[in-house]
Amino acid sequence: MTGLRPVSNPPNPWESTHLDWLEEPPAAALEVYEEEARSLLAENQSPDLGFRFSVNPYRGCWHACAYCYARPSHQWLGFGAGTDFERRIVVKRNAPRLLRRELGRRGWKRDLVVFSGDTDCYQPLEASYGLTRACLEVCSEFATPVGVITKSALVRRDVDVLAELARRGLATVHVSIPFADRELARRIEPFAPPPARRFETLRILSEAGIPTGVSVSPLIPALNDSQVPEILERAREAGARFAFSTLLRLPGEVRAVFEARLREALPLRAEHVLSALRDTRGGRLSESAFFERQRGRGPRWQILRDLFELHRRRLGFEGGDSRGASPAPAEEGRAELRARAPGTPERQLALFEATAPPPARGARTR
């Protein structure tokens, strides 16, 4: 934890408002650590992802989603991937200053910058620190296009900045809604806003002229696949123009966290869900190889893919196939990877996991 400064009394985002828990209070207390980061832009080298650069002002995430692929990144700090990831949050206090420095470099070519490539940039601490808003303002200053993905209704606060960026063709916001059912969502992602609030957020952003989309991710066989049609219908009614979905991934310690939560929250369904996931992963619960991580295989996966695509097309969503549904052939993909990252050792093709600051294998910051 070198360089992290614990905050004994973090800023109170509700100083002038009344505080009510949306659900029951968390089991673990919040601990906030502040750091002066050395860099902010994370450069992705994975061909599975449709962006090169991402910004994450926070490490760890209050939403406590059991399936979050970013959990292992918390171990780089000496923390755990379980409740530590959810309640020991690190704040990059100097994020806007770093971003201004990095976007101001001569070599910057105004590439797309994705917010929440790792943890949610609009988790509750953002109400106090305002780092995401400040970073969006920097992107506006440098005419840099942004893509935001979030579960949080707090993104509504920044509708003015996002609408201005959108007016210049520089902003898109996706809201992540893997569940339509409030109770099921609460069990798997307990401190994220309920689905109804996320659909409402889509509507507010869309009405402000901001291009919006819905991420039905992760797709969890035998758990949320039956809710796909309703999610897409409600998102379209709220003004969403784009839709994508990716299959559940359980890298590293995420598997243990997800299995424990699933068995505790849904003991009678847990084994069926895990068995269904194995059916889409060739008998395994997860896949780490490039071009395989975000899609499945076999008849069950084909059914899930066809279900999503049928309703996406029926409802008139823009864009192509669901993310990860039709990846490049293996050899073509490997050639693409080598072109993007010359000299990448062959073994990294199978070992690569999600990029996140601090950098995971196959990623670097700049």
Image (cartoon, rainbow, N blue to C red):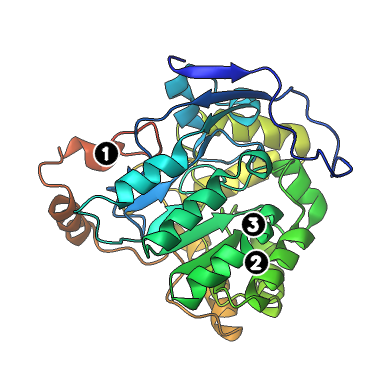
Examine the rendered structure and indicate whether residue 59 appears above or below residue 330.
Answer: above
Badge 3 density bin: few <14, some 14–19, many ≥20, Cα 10 Å:
many
Q: CA distance from mark 3 to mark 1?
A: 30 Å
Q: Amino acid at mark 3?
A: Val
- At 41% from the left and 60% from the top, the residue drawn is 141
Quarter of the image for residue 86 reads top right
Residue depicted at 24% across the width and 62% down the height? 329
Looking at the figure, which quarter contains the C terminus?
A: top left
- Residue picked out by circle 1: 362
Query: Label 3, label 2: how many angstroms apart (C-alpha)?
Result: 24 Å
The residue under label 3 is: 155
- Separation (CA) of disc 2 from disc 1: 33 Å
Name which residue type carries label 1. Gly
Q: Which residue is mark 2?
A: 228
Identify whether 39 is placed above or below 237: above
Q: Are marks 3 and 1 in contact (CB under 8 Å)?
A: no
Residue found 65% across the figure and 54% down from its top:
222
Q: Secondary structure under badge 2?
A: helix
Q: Residue 135: percent from the left, percent from the top?
A: 48, 50
Q: Nearer the viewer, residue 269 or 262?
A: 262
